[in-house]
Amino acid sequence: MVKTSISAIILFSLAAALVFYYFAEGLSEGLCSNKIYREYPSPDRSLKAVVFQRECGPSSGATTQISLIDAAETLENRAGNILVLKGKPENAAPAIAWKSEQEMIIYRAIDGNEFKAETRYDRETPVKIDYQK
């Protein structure tokens, strides 16, 4: 009887934690907003690099972020999937150039102050991301 009660408490606690996580993640996305700064289409126009400002309330401040998305898609209210930097795009946004459909250059040296700096975007045909000064 005691083992059954403990098992039920553990199961209930795990279920409650999963429900909390699900709603907390959705709630935090709802508190944030994205404002597109600039878009860079790939040479074949199948993808685009979107540079945007993301704000998640007054205490967190604005960040400059970059996402690679399909050209036909619109930017969702999510964090950038390639690069996340401190500051607003007017001051922090790097220039971007495409060498080919599979290689993109971000003109910014990586210095360790980035929140995120991916070097590859995985999809059917991966995109290599180079950082240059």
Image (cartoon, rainbow, N blue to C red):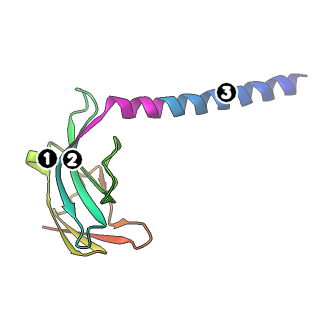
> Among all residues in the image, which is located at the extreme right?
1
Give neighbour class at mark 3: few <14, some 14-19, many 20+ (Cα, 10 Å): few
What is the distance, in whole Å, between disc 2 and disc 1 at their CAs?
Answer: 7 Å
103 to 89, vertically: above or below: below
Q: Give the magenta part as a residue range.
A: 24-35
Picture quadrant where residue 117 is located: bottom left
Mark linked to residue 52: 2
Q: Is residue 77 left or right of residue 55?
A: right
> Among all residues in the image, which is located at the extreme bottom?
100
Q: Amino acid at mark 1?
A: Pro
Residue beneath disc 3: 13
- Residue 114 at x, y = what percent? 25, 52
Residue beneath disc 1: 89
What is the distance, in whole Å, between disc 3 and disc 1 at their CAs?
Answer: 42 Å
Q: Amino acid at mark 3?
A: Ser
Q: Residue at x 32, y 72 (%)?
A: 128
Q: Amino acid at mark 2?
A: Phe
80 to 35, vertically: above or below: below
Secondary element under disc 1, as helix, strand or loop, is helix
Secondary element under disc 2, as helix, strand or loop, is strand
Looking at the rendered image, the quarter that the N terminus falls into is top right
Q: Is residue 2 left or right of residue 76?
A: right
> Among all residues in the image, which is located at the extreme left?
91
For marks 3 and 1, the one nearer the N-term is 3
Do tag 2 and tag 1 residues touch (Cβ < 8 Å)?
yes
- Residue 63 at x, y = what percent? 21, 42
Give neighbour class at mark 2: few <14, some 14-19, many 20+ (Cα, 10 Å): many
For marks 2 and 1, the one nearer the N-term is 2
For marks 2 and 3, the one nearer the N-term is 3
- Comparing labels 3 and 1, the label whose residue is closer to the camera: 1
Magenta stretch: dominant secondary structure: helix
